[in-house]
Image: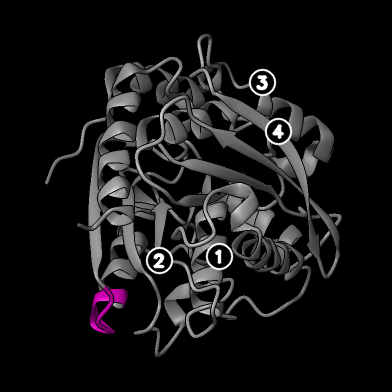
Amino acid sequence: MERRVHPALARVVAARQAAPRAHPATQGIEQRRAEFLSDPLAQWAGPDVMADIRDVLLTGRGGPIRARLYVPTVLHGGGLVVYFHGGSYVMGDLESHDGVCRRIAQHVGVRLLAIDYRRAPEHAFPAAVEDAIDATREAYRRRAEFCGPDDPLVVMGDSAGATLATDVAAALAHEPERPEGQVLFYPTLGPQLMTASAQEFRQGYGIDLDHLRYDYGQYLQGRDPMDPRVSPLFVRNIGSTAQAIIVIAACDPLRDEDVAYAGLLEHYGVRVELLEAAGMIHGFIRYGGTVPEVLAILDEVSEHLHRLLSPS
């Protein structure tokens, strides 16, 4: 199947291939984070208006965890989405994904709690995983404050944040805080990166493989890359994990491994909806302010998420 990059993104891909971005080893981490936040494609000139936005603190084994609660202007039933941002485990924060979180909260009509987990290289694996699990546990226990005392909870994330969502779903599968669902936008599934799509889209398509491998080194700092919390394709016996919505980008080096992960979940009896975003590259959900088609994709995913939260 031929996959063409969306015209608005094709120009970006061509420019990044002609003039590759500096290797992260040559930049300071704060410079990288600032460039990630200021990416021209990721600016939202008119983000969705919320009824309320407030920052809160959650309790984690590594210390306080910052989070931000988004309350839409119109609620469609109950529920809480716990969101983990992307950024290769080293970049991204509450600000970098503000427009995305607003859009999802408003169009699902559900409260959303974005989590500011610890990042590498200052905090190596498993710090981010611990924060994700601890934040979800506390969000569940504080549902009466954040949503309704009996409302369902769903974990969601993009890229590295999507992998954290899989970690949470697996860790809490047999606990009272078990999420009702997991929504994964193009998760990173380990540093192996040996699939056909990884080779086809290795540079310029939203994420460069040599950069991602470097970031995995910053994240792992010598720890086992085969740990299922790092590489979920090596997990086993996950039949009790939450049902999943997995969104892949057609022109993403991670596309093939994400499809494989969907197959792994189905093999263990987990209900999976696999959605492909035509013409999109890795990281596309942050581009809704500049690429209108991204908003349509987010709205479609929001409809699936709404059905997950309100199955009746």
- The x and y percentages for residue 44 are 53, 16
Which span of residues is magenta-colored? Answer: 265-270
Amino acid type for the residue under numbered disc 2: Glu
Q: Is residue 157 above or below residue 227?
A: above
> Residue at point 46% right, 62% down?
193
- Give me the disc on residue 38: 3
Query: Residue 160 or 170: which is nearer the viewer?
Result: 170
Query: Residue 6 or 76: which is nearer the viewer?
Result: 76
- The x and y percentages for residue 172 are 54, 77
For marks 1 and 2, the one nearer the N-term is 2
Q: CA distance from mark 1 to mark 3?
A: 26 Å
What residue is disc 2 on?
180
Quarter of the image with the C terminus is bottom left
- Give me the disc on residue 150: none
Q: Is residue 260 above or below residue 67?
A: below
Q: Label 1: few (<14), some or many (≥20) within 10 Å?
A: some
Element type at mark 3: loop
For marks 1 and 4, the one nearer the N-term is 4
What residue is disc 4 on?
54
Give the quadrant of residue 25. top right
Element type at mark 4: strand
Q: Label 3: few (<14), some or many (≥20) within 10 Å?
A: few
